Amino acid sequence: MKIAALQMNSQPDLQHNLDQAAALVADAAAQGAELIGLPENFAWLSEERLMAENVRAVGDAVRTALPAWAQKHGVYLLAGGYPVPAGGSSGKVFNRAELFAPDGGLVAAYNKMHLFDVIVSEEEKYLESAYVQAGEAEPVTARIEMRPGNTSIEKKHPSEKEKPAGLTLGLSVCYDLRFPELYRALVQRGADLLCVPAAFTKKTGAAHWHLLLRARAVENTAYVMAPAQAGLHGKKRETYGHAMIVNPWGEIIAEVTDGKPGVAIAEISPEFLADTRRRLPCLKHRRIS
């Protein structure tokens, strides 16, 4: 199965972002990708908080465009993260990742559970919890089949005899990457491919992005797909880029390195995954669960 991690430079301009995403999805599909991942905040990214009317516009556009693109190209499509009203009186949103099937149907949805409240420097501070509500601390996995159009959400890891040809995805978003217990829980639920759509800051990305993605792959003997934002968004916010795919041995097998919108595409092999886990059975050697 070929998969693609997209790199975008999203702006506070919905139509610009949708046009860019549509072109990249088409490019990845033309190269044979069956699963395509968009980064966090693919439909809107700036240093400003989205107002309620923008949230509605973004949500309506995503729920119209993504199923249509999935159907048009016959691919699984991961909407890496976009704002969805959380309800209640707080006015907050969920930062939600959604997976769409080749028939346009919704396979799975995950609300980002770890929120980016950090002080990168005195000039660069973030308080995501001021406008985003954390999702429930419940890992989400989804089964995708190599035969297009056949999907089922997996709550538990079935036996090998029960598993049809395909992959189980583990969903996460950006800052989740710093919490290894989430990825171990996803693998315990059967995840073969860990999805990390992100908008890492330039400073933290330069220091930790490659390190953390390769660590999550190695410690879980799993593939990792990491779509990313790159460049300047609006006037101040800047992200690191380097969308990539990492194999279970920790090798980067595809990466966008030039800081521009692009496609990281690679073929992933369930046979290589199984062989790596057989030769290096760390998951079976665990003493603490």
Image: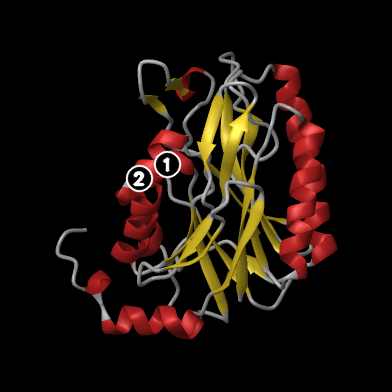
Q: Does residue 204 lie above or below 102 as drawn? A: above
Q: Left of 193 or right of it: where is 32?
A: right
Residue 8 image position (x, y, % from top left) = 65, 45
Q: Residues within 10 Å of mark 2 (few under 14, many from 20)?
A: few
| Amino acid of disc 2 | His
Q: Left of 14 or right of it: where is 204?
A: left
**Mark 2–mark 1 distance (CA, rounded to whole Å):** 5 Å
Residue at 57%, 31% (x, y): give it: 94
Q: Left of 178 or right of it: where is 195?
A: right
Residue at 18%, 72% (x, y): give it: 285
| Amino acid of disc 1 | Gly
Q: Which mark is residue 205?
A: 1
Q: Which mark is residue 208?
A: 2
Residue at 35%, 45% (x, y): give it: 208
Q: Count the marks.
A: 2
Q: Secondary structure at mark 2?
A: helix
Q: Quadrant of the N terminus?
A: bottom right
Q: Does residue 34 lie above or below 7 as drawn? A: below
Residue 166 image position (x, y, % from top left) = 57, 76
